[in-house]
Amino acid sequence: MSESIPAADTLSRRTFFNGTAAVAGVGGLVLGAGGALAGTAAKAPAALSDVDLMAQRATLSYPFYGGHQAGIETPPQDHLVFTAFDVTALTAVELQLVLAKWSAAMAELTAGAPVGKIQPEREQGIPVDTGEATDMGPQGLTLTLGFGPSLFDERFGLEKFKPLNFADLPAMAGESLNPALMGGDLCIQACANDPQVAYHAVRNLARMARTAVRTKWTVLGFGRASAGAAQSTPRNLMGFKDGTRNASGGVDFDEHVWVGDEAGQPWMVGGSYLVARKIHMLIETWDEDPIGDQQSIFGRDKKQGAPLSGTAEHDVPDFHATVDGTPVIAADSHIALAAHENNNGLKILRRGYNFTDGLDSVGRLDAGLMFLSFQKSPEQFITLQRKLGSSDRLNEYIRHVGSGVFAVPAGIPAAGSYYGKEFFA
Ligand SMILES: C=CC1=C(C)c2cc3[nH]c(cc4nc(cc5[nH]c(cc1n2)c(C)c5CCC(=O)O)C(CCC(=O)O)=C4C)c(C)c3C=C
Ligand SMILES: [Fe+2]
């Protein structure tokens, strides 16, 4: 990570547990899945009480200002609220106001502060902040803003700011896309250790912009289905470890995630492209598939997450290994098709979440993976998905139902600026 995580006790404008920040001196601490401590923890996990652990998760915050937006390289938190919006405003000035208001409010929210009065003095006063995150702390909240290709159409005169070759994703095999779950002029990826804090952020951002933007589609995610540096690997709803091999480290980010000059737009230097795919899993069918078949579909063992050519999760897959002339990792397995070794070194940063929408109209589980990936160019995703969509044995058990691609601008350097400022100069 290019930005350090400042000491938790210096970050929150509010305090936790009645003003007692129980975590003084835990600078640089990040909590991994299952409460495991990672990063530069000052104390061993066993020395921390449940109250300490909760307080650390609550008071953790990431810097809002910097070269890159948070929520990309920062370690994935436990919960997601992803929302795409359409701009209903008719003028560029209204859009400018939304972006300026959102940027200032995002700085407040990610610091754990409300976006205005929760309890106005006058009886007739309408609360500005809706209040449900009061005293909960920042909870590691990150808010990542993206611009859809449609934002750069003629409505606001932004055509000349459109990044080179930035367009909606092409139709690809294996899709059953629902038009109600597609696209958007803007998107916000809100991630936090607490679902209510993430929800509160998006709710209040949408509310303050309600005369100018309309929510288009949203996905609530849980059980982060990816791992950042020093985090343990979580599992997706198919029961497999997800996020074992991912873009990681400064070199990978520079090579595969952060945009340089190639977008032809200074505002994208240090930004990235976000691809969002809501992927429905046919869970009842998957659950009846024998373990041998499940493992051969992914090319990995279910319990350890090891490649079928190895024994430990982080063993490097050997795609040339054979037994009696048959490849140990099938050529049409998910990892054989997606691995960088088999795609000219191509990598993406996967930062997805599990989701469930309860039951569908006929009582089946309505759940899956909210696949989110960040990459230097949407072409990286398209290349992989074209291959997966046509050959992946996993396709029998999944359907892509939602889709969007968003240009994620670089971070805001300091207070006083805002996302998209360059568009209105
Ligand atoms: C276009 C990109 C990808 C889509 C869409 C996708 C969907 C998808 N993936 C899983 C589960 C797993 N994926 C795993 C690895 C993996 N997946 C992709 C890309 C897409 N996945 C890549 C690039 C990789 C890494 C391959 C490698 O280098 O070995 C794994 C294995 C564990 C891991 O490395 O993370 C699992 C499990 C699901 C369930 C899914 C759609 C619902
Ligand atoms: Fe995958």
Image (cartoon, grey):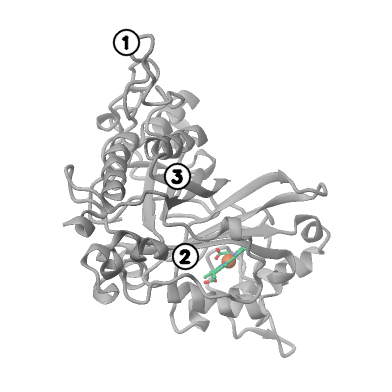
Query: How many numbered marks does the figure carry?
Result: 3
Q: Quadrant of the C terminus?
A: bottom left
- In the picture, measured across the screen, residue 74 lies left or right of residue 82, that is left
Where disc 2 sits, the SS reads loop
Q: Amino acid at mark 2?
A: Asn
Q: Residue at x 71, y 74 (%)?
A: 393
Q: Is mark 3 within 8 Å of ligand 1?
A: no
With respect to residue 420, does 16 lie above or below? above
Q: Which residue is labeled 2 in the image?
A: 246
Quarter of the figure with residue 348? bottom left
Depth check, front residue: 150 or 312: 150
* Label 3, label 2: how far apart the Cα atoms are: 19 Å
With respect to residue 123, does 166 lie above or below? below
Depth check, front residue: 4 or 359: 359
Quarter of the figure with residue 55? top left
Q: Of the residues tagged 1 and 3, which is closer to the observer? A: 1
Q: Amino acid at mark 3?
A: Cys
Q: Which residue is labeled 1 in the image?
A: 121
Depth check, front residue: 77 or 295: 77
Q: Earlier in the sequence, mark 3 or mark 2?
A: 3
Q: Is mark 2 within 8 Å of ligand 1?
A: yes
What mark, if any, has residue 191 been given in the picture? 3
- In the picture, measured across the screen, residue 415 lies left or right of residue 326, that is left
